[in-house]
Image (tube, coloured by chain):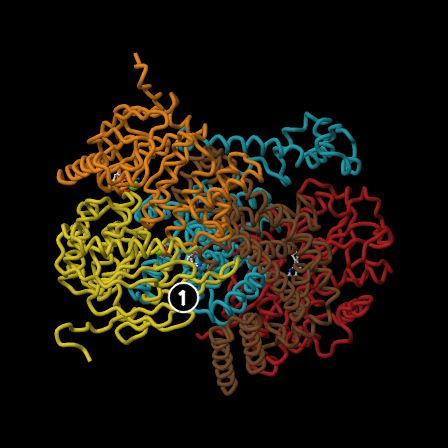
Chain colours: A cyan, B brown, C orange, D yellow, E red
Amino acid sequence: MSRYGPLLLLVAALFALWYAAAVPMNIREALSAAERNGVVVEPATAIERRDANALGLVAANLAQIPAAWAQDRPRLPAPHQIVGELWQSVVMEEIEGQRGLLKSGSLSNRGLLLHVWITLSATALGFVIGTVAGVLLAVGIVHSRTMERSVMPWAIVSQTVPIVALAPMIVVVLYSVGLQGLLPKAIISAYLSFFPVVVGMVKGLRAPDAMQTDLMRTWDASGWQVLTRLRLPASMPYLFASLKIAVAAALVGAIVGELPVQGGGLGARMLAGSYYGQTAQIWAALLLAAALAAGLVAAIGGAQRLALRRMGGAA
Amino acid sequence: MSAAILALALWLGLWALNVWLATGPLSNRIWARMAVPLLFGITILILWEIAVRALQVPLVILPPPSQIGARFAESLPLLWGDFVQTILRGALSGYAIGCGAAFLTAIAVDRFVFLQRGLLPLASFMAALPIVGTAPILVMWFGFDWQSKAAVVVVMVFFPMLVNTVAGLAETSAMQRDLMKSWGAGYWSGLVKLRLPAAMPFIFNGLKICTTLALIGAIVAEFFGSPTLGLGFRITTSVGQLALDMVWAAILVAALAGTGFYGLVALIERGVTFWHPSQRG
Amino acid sequence: MPMMNAPIPQTVISARGVDLTFDTNDGSVHALRSVDLDIGKGEFVSFIGPSGCGKTTFLRVVAALETPTAGTVSVNGMTPDEARRARAYGYVFQAAGLYPWRTIGGNIALPLEIMGFDRAERTRRVREVMQLVELSGFEKKYPWQLSGGMQQRASIARALAFDAEILLMDEPFGALDEIVRDRLNEELLRLWAATGKTTLFVTHSIPEAVYLSTKIVVMSPRPGRITDVIDSPLPRERPLEIRDSPEFIEIAHRVREGLRAGHAEH
Amino acid sequence: MPMMNAPIPQTVISARGVDLTFDTNDGSVHALRSVDLDIGKGEFVSFIGPSGCGKTTFLRVVAALETPTAGTVSVNGMTPDEARRARAYGYVFQAAGLYPWRTIGGNIALPLEIMGFDRAERTRRVREVMQLVELSGFEKKYPWQLSGGMQQRASIARALAFDAEILLMDEPFGALDEIVRDRLNEELLRLWAATGKTTLFVTHSIPEAVYLSTKIVVMSPRPGRITDVIDSPLPRERPLEIRDSPEFIEIAHRVREGLRAGHAEH
Amino acid sequence: QDLDEVRLQLQWVTQAQFAGYYVALEEGFYEEEGLDVEILPGGPDIAPPQVLAGGGADVMLNWMPSALAAREKGLPVVNIAQPFASSGLMLTCWKDTGITGPQDFKGKTIGVWFFGNEYPFLSWMSQEGIPTEGGEEGVTVLKQGFNVDPLIQRQADCISTMTYNEYGQVLDAGISEDELVTFKYEDMGVATLEDGMWVLEENLEDPEFVDKMTRFVRASMKGWKWAETNPEEAAMIVLDNDETGAQTEAHQVRMMGEIAKLTEGSDGSLDEAAYQRTVDTLLAGGSDPVISQVPDGAWTSRITDEALK
Ligand SMILES: Nc1ncnc2c1ncn2[C@@H]1O[C@H](COP(=O)(O)OP(=O)(O)OP(=O)(O)O)[C@@H](O)[C@H]1O
Ligand SMILES: Nc1ncnc2c1ncn2[C@@H]1O[C@H](COP(=O)(O)OP(=O)(O)OP(=O)(O)O)[C@@H](O)[C@H]1O
Ligand SMILES: Cc1ncc(C[n+]2csc(CCO)c2C)c(N)n1
Ligand SMILES: [Mg+2]
Ligand SMILES: [Mg+2]
């Protein structure tokens, strides 16, 4: 089987499963809608159906299955509905929409591309800040016992603060001191992404074994030299595992930072979608965010392979 | 101005004390180990108190630690109920299910190239299913109570745990693997006797990162619907009432729970991966 | 047709035209070229040759850890991989390769666990082989708490513990002093005589090779190949003093010449 | 008062009552007990003794990698740690310890980079020492692409590259065949004669120890201690044939006796 | 021509609920008054009083319960204008659950918005004598997210809705009005004032600020009246200002229609009777009243008086 065969196969299986699951998930609303249109369904009233088993409902009303894949406000939209929405909001909106790329010359705020761009730029900035901060902190922790003992526990505490709860507050406070636009979101995104980096790098920077560090000692290498020539190269497997998590966390951070909805972005889009019951819109944004994450993780994976190759490959 | 100088002096003084405690002659005493982070925390709290008072920050923006402490002490029964709902019911069950599922998936991925090619990209697709998007949907699917919070946690911890376990299972040297081969070890004994032990440092990395993620997930999911208790519920409603002292008291509960949880996992890690250079110190 | 008075031992390992090339970032390395070799049941074969001449690689091919680019190897009529699955090999690697999360005792017991020996039997065997390599009392220590030579001895003990049919030993005694080495040489010879295990043994010491072997394979590098195969006329019963006998000295001389030739070439 | 005709060399390393105990999970190990030793400038001192007797530990103490539990060591009148900072040591570890992410050339260049040699000088020295250990042509390979002996040679080259005042070598030639070993022995002796580097050398080979050393230290285990110190009467100029001289054989005999005594004890 | 800067903090995302302000901005009413206005959208978890306290805004829109609570918490905010004359808050229930009046709530599950919006509900329940701790004799309260799914999925028997937004969403989901029962807080006598304009008390001592606010209120009310008469255009203006692009035209047009009913009959000045009723409702909040004492100086007619001259 080719490189991508398994992926395609699994995706196909996933879609099949998805369609199957959408039927029992949406059957109640489908039946209610049918009932309103005068179709006789079994059992006849919503209150009776409330306590019935979903699979039982499907079995009793096989004719309504297609309707379960065509709900306006489904509990679980069918894949084609989401694809349709994606097509609409990613492609058609830019081509045909009043504010689309073709008619106005800039990306439309009703399409998703603009929001992807907004979120992506905050993510990138936050990821860079977070990674740099995380690596620096890990270096400090590995080099100073005082840092390790006093800062590490608080780095942990910092992550238990539900930043997401405070995110809007932080954005507001930063706004009031004149920081706006990308930076507040990037800061939240950095806050979420630095921790996996710290944890992984503290372990990675300590991964060299005794002989490897002893060698450096006999050469009287400075702390900096030990860091750049031994600890950092030895920590690469840990770094990349951490970076994959960090980049995903940075994306989550950026999206969370968009909760105050000002300025758009995928987070604002999802939330607004949720307020107005635009299920397809939430799912479209959600899947796009997930695809973005997968893309970013894959990019890190690519960087990892490149780095490993430059570092001698196997063993 | 004088407050700034006082704060600075205090910072320098306590940091110096900390350096002495951490590296000085007493550094191996158990109480000194405990005292260092506490002192650091106390330093921050004092600075916070000074800053809030000196700058006259409105209470509805940031209350001083003293007031938060008082509110915390007053509301212990209420906060205990929130703790049970959010941490014990929501976060812990989600953590166990999520990490367990990721662990098993990682093993399957490691076993079958098919899954490695097919499932791993799909899983990274799940990496950043942002909580903002998933939480409303999961609340819609699993109801308002802790089950939906656990589901959110499962989704959040799955990927970090998976990535770490997969990386860990690959972390054996060629000679270690060759030895196993020369004994004609089957897949399972290779897994149990070699790859899992060698993966432990990575697995614990994942477990540690997930402790805090689990808390965040459980708390934030409550923003999207909850019964009338829970830490997330407490935080949102208190923000609405501008009872910022209560907000921070709830955060304090989360921080205590999170630190304890993390500490516990780190302790187990010490026991399990004692052999790793990073633990031999 | 075999002669009555000199039974030709049954061939256990047979290599035919084995070739192995490694591809590396800057060109390929010809590690083995047209290696032909037959090893009979119960033979003790030493491999000797300059560093980098393919000794380790040949042992790895026999143990199915490396696949030759050309040629075939058969072990007891099976492929090396089938033999590996049948747990025919006890392999002592050139570096100790102990698992850091297990104590020395635990490391030695590991292959026994994998092969399904019961607890009592494991304990017994571990005790026995640890005594053999003079490590009694170090059961509970971790690898990093042992000296280099002690680690090497632990890894020898590990390979001996489960009584494999074929022993593959890659410079097992490199890190040991003369006295221990002599003692272990004697022990190994005794063990070999008693059990009749087919043994492939890599060494850099000419006296060691001559003292132990029924057959000495001299190899030469770039490309790695066999330059001489010497069948030893020494009796199976070998006291240490045999090392002063004229036969011994003669074989040693032949080996040294072979080695020197290999070195001079490039 | 020193005699005119036998200049007492200036003492470079002096150990007084050195004791070292390791604490482990099951009790403590007495690795060194009351070790007294003086090593003069330019001496070549070999350490020999059964595995686990503390040879490596003593070298580590000298190199400030281990702190003695009691006693003092001075190096050029400084503490070992000060000497380490002055980059007095070139250390060859018992295992090769190459960094897997650097090529062989990169590994050898690493201490040079750290000590601030410029690029041209680095390239020159790397080429030189690689030639010395017969690894030319392997600059671009990674450690795992080399055989065990080649790795060990690379690590020797690394320690020689930066011209440290004191060489500490822990069984550097353990994984090499006799021919290369003889050649490297000669090279080392030549290098030592030319540069007058003080050298501490751990070996398991009695002939090697006798051939190379001005002083041979025999150690014995549990607890690790010095049982004999033999000053060699051999001249500094030593052709390989000296190994057949009666003086040589006599010293070798004394060393062997010392070793055997150490073994018999426990 | 130097424009005076004013920052307005909304209490929810950009939608027709705030049409008057967007109209005033887009139609240039603010500029005519010499103002450069910046409108800051809100959302869940943004507490406008906090933004005000932090100096992030000059004036905020807020529901009176939450503003009065903030005042008691030590943040002295003052109502300077009240464009919404009546409340749009209501409970929407499935008819087939058998609910006909408040007493039928017993044993049912009800979704309530928190974040300050729970006060009128709690006060109402305490007037009805229904406990809110769940059980057969009480109601089970859920903290409802800001959408109507709990009702549609029947996770709750009733949910909170606004006449102008969520109720419409319920209907959009295909549910007809006669499947539902609604309870407007206005009809139940527990309505509280919504969407007033509030500023920090200390700022009112500054005549320049007062003057700025006077012009702001005047222009805003002009915007509201324009929106009431041109609902479709107003909705389009709101849509143009929505940065998320999530809203649909139909929805905003309908919302504008409903909003107009609430602002209708208000010239921006606060109706004292309505204020009194709000305060009474909040004081009657059972064991846990929203405010513990009658507020003093929580509103002023100074600015509206001046603006409407
Ligand atoms: N890090 C350590 N922790 C505990 N014990 C140790 C440690 N390092 C060495 N030892 C013990 O100290 C003793 C001396 O070890 P050392 O490595 O010096 O021996 P050696 O003479 O170099 O032996 P070999 O010839 O086998 O290398 C041994 O018994 C060993 O078990
Ligand atoms: N994995 C590998 N990739 C590339 N080249 C390799 C690899 N393993 C070994 N080689 C090369 O193959 C040749 C033979 O190596 P091998 O390890 O068999 O030598 P050896 O005879 O065991 O030497 P030594 O006595 O030094 O252990 C060497 O030139 C080595 O560089
Ligand atoms: C921060 C905050 N969130 C929600 C509300 C309540 N509320 C006021 S208007 C509105 C939208 C109705 O469509 C809602 C839900 C609030 N007052 N403050
Ligand atoms: Mg080899
Ligand atoms: Mg040693």
Instruction: Report x, y in % for residue C39.
Output: 32, 26
Residue at 51% across, 44% down: C127
Q: Is residue A298 left or right of residue D252?
A: right
Q: Can residue C232 be seen in this view?
A: yes
Q: How many labels does the image show?
A: 1
Asked whether mark 1 and ligand 1 are closer than 8 Å, the reply comes as no
Residue A139, image quadrant: bottom left
Q: Which amino acid does label 1 sit on?
A: Arg
Q: Which of A306 and A166 is in front in this view?
A: A306
Q: Is residue E271 left or right of residue D254?
A: right
Q: Nearer the viewer, residue C97 or E23?
A: C97
Q: Is residue B270 left or right of residue C264?
A: right
Residue at 34% across, 21% down: C9
Instruction: Report x, y in % for residue E42.
Output: 58, 61
Q: In which quarter of the image is ligand 1?
A: bottom left
At mark 1, the secondary structure is: strand
Q: Is residue A289 visible?
A: no
Pointer 1: residues within 10 angstroms few (<14), some, or many (20+)?
many
Q: Which of the chains bears the disc numbered 1?
A: D
Q: Nearer the viewer, residue A73 or A146?
A: A146
Looking at the image, the residue that sits furthest to the bottom is B2
Instruction: Report x, y in % for residue A192.
Output: 51, 58
**Residue beneath label 1, please?**
D33
Give the answer, above or below, for where A32 lies relative to E45. above
Q: In which quarter of the image is the C terminus of chain B?
A: bottom left
Give the answer, above or below, for where A233 lies relative to A65. below
Q: Which of B74 and E199 is in front in this view?
A: B74
Give the answer, above or below, for where E191 lies relative to A18. below
Instruction: Report x, y in % for residue B39.
Output: 55, 75
Give the answer, above or below, for where B242 lies relative to B206. below
